[in-house]
Image (cartoon, rainbow, N blue to C red):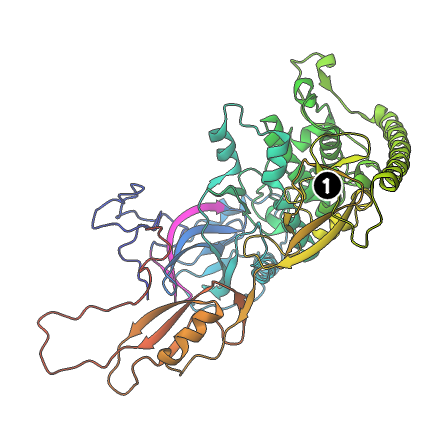
Amino acid sequence: MFHSENLCMNCLYPLEGSSACPHCGFPQDFVQEPPGLPLRTLLGGRYTVGKALEFGGDGISYTGWDTVTGHAVRLREFFPDAIAHRAKQRLEEDVRHTNIPGKPFLGKTAPVITGRDEGGFSIVPLDGFGLAFTACLDSFRAMWSKLEQMRGLSGLLPVLNVFEENNTVYAVQEACKGSTLREFLLLRSVTGTLSADAALRLLAPLLPALAALHSAGVLHLGISPASIIVTPERKICLTGFSVWQARTAGGGLRSELYPGYAAPEQYGLSERQGPWTDVYAVAGLYYRVLVGSDPIDATLRVRNDRMMIPGKLAEHLPAYVINALSNALDVNPHARTDSIERFRAEINAAPDAVWADTVPAVSHVKQDEELPKENAMPVTTANHETKRIIFKTAAITLSICMIAGLILSLIFKDAVMQIFSPPSPTEPQMPVITEPGPGNYEVPDFVALDLSYSDVLSNAVWSQQFKFETVFDYSSDIEKNKILEQSVAAGEYVLLGTPIVLKVSKGPEMITVPAYVGRNIADLQTTLEQAGFKISLILEPNDGNNTAGDIIWGTLTEGRQYPRGTELFLHVYDEPETTTEPETDPPETTTKSSNQFPWWPF
């Protein structure tokens, strides 16, 4: 067991015997105020509760410590304080009731789940809110259980466990080092913005993760710069999940809406919520990263939609980015971009999205009354049809030019080949050229676009310009079916039909855990390590009736598949204690592990 007695309950680094943490200054005698759980409360028989990080909506988030693996975790406790209280920390019910808009879900008290704690720290619904508590609890359990099944999804903090205790439900996630997107932007530059290319690269992993969530029936409804964590490696993680009742005005819980990112329908100003609701928030993220300020609150836009992109900024943004944001930030959910897949295609300038005839109605983005009208780019209902006509005309013109260029390049190529190239059974690869010219095509950065290989192969324009070949390889970092490498560098100009080899990720290599309980580590350790597991041994006392090295239990499930490199903690019997010479000092418990605290980067 990796105990937490000598750990700071804020940053989870060693206290080193001091009264305050030498790393973060957190006092060792800190007392967690109600309604949070006391520091060092043990949940699920293994998770130590640390400092409360946030309290609102559907519960409380804590830092935590997994005493089995010796890793930091993040704990989420279902505790909707608008309709429930903790048994030991009950507040006056009349005060709580005044904070519930409209008092929804009034009804008879319904039975709730029973955890390990019949009293003490149990979460109990307020009188008359039993049905509401049960409905919200079911939503919480279902949401986190789905997230647990998607633990390998890039862009999300893995959910390690979901369990019931204290008459409520707890979710356990991996801890994530980093800063919020808002902090990252403010620390990076004075303006708090990124270029269009940098913004697209940074936020690209968020889109496939959201698409997968929507396919599983999970809506986030709280996406904002505060719910995106940027790691030191500049990878992003989506956090801040909550049940829909807390992300909808009048949903029965204390509303947790983020102005500028919450869509009009979350305020009850429209009847529809769905994937398009998250699309609105994601477009708001892109807007914040590019412009440097939050979008205008949806409640104001519904009454007077005068949002604009400043003209100086619009001059440096690709037209397809402006178009994608305009469509996704439409206050009318019926006209808004209806899926993350569609938004992803538009923001990445996929041809079938940019030039489609069915571009949703557009309402533009940032209000800036100090700028004169000629310095801004408003998009209002009056010019929707004009924009559609311009797009259609440009599409036809572009198509004609492309066809003419293809014909000329083919004629030119055939003439040159007939004059200068003698017949040969094996033709060499077409050369890569560095200068643009007639019949030459620039190679896109397929890796940075973060598209799946099927997206690339099905693209009508690219499939005409290049000849694609694919090879596959395992990757623990890149999502399955995403492109790892391309044989021709981005930005090079090549002739029509030049072969380009795309190396495609097969995702992490999955290996099956063999049966190990009851076997001896001496016979099994090499096999496990050669299979790809990292092995850490934890010695348990042996009274002499057991064989040293026999495995008692481990942290991975036998017969289940895990990514190569996963760490397996094995509890094994130590050598029997000897009594030939008396011990002058109590023997120290020995833990054989590559690092006693593997979470710390020593």
Q: Residue 150 placed where, x, y %?
A: 59, 59
Q: Residue 53 placed where, x, y %?
A: 43, 46
Residue at (55, 37) in percent of width and height: 225
Vertical arrangement, residue 287 with respect to residue 350, above or below: above
Residue at (43, 50) in percent of width and height: 91
- Crowding around mark 1 (Cα neighbors within 10 Å: few <14, some 14 to 19, many 20+) is few
Residue 316 vs residue 144, the one in the foreground: 316
Q: Amino acid at mark 1?
A: Pro
Magenta-tinted stretch: 40-55
241 left or right of 571 in image: right
Q: Quadrant of residue 311?
A: top right
Q: Residue furthest bottom?
A: 545
449 left or right of 71 in image: right
353 left or right of 403 in image: left
Residue at (27, 88) in percent of width and height: 545
Tell me if residue 65 can be seen: yes
Q: Quadrant of residue 332?
A: top right
Q: Residue 37 placed where, x, y %?
A: 39, 54
State the SS at label 1.
loop
Q: Which corner quadrant holds the N terminus?
A: bottom left
Residue at (34, 54) in percent of width and height: 39
- In magenta stretch: residue 166: no
Please give the count of numbered marks on the rendered protein.
Answer: 1
Q: Residue 349 placed where, x, y %?
A: 74, 37
Vertical arrangement, residue 286 with respect to residue 144, above or below: above
- In magenta stretch: residue 49: yes
Magenta: main secondary structure equals: strand
Residue 323 vs residue 61, the one in the foreground: 323
322 left or right of 66 in image: right
Tell me if residue 273 can be seen: no
Q: Which residue is mark 1?
A: 431
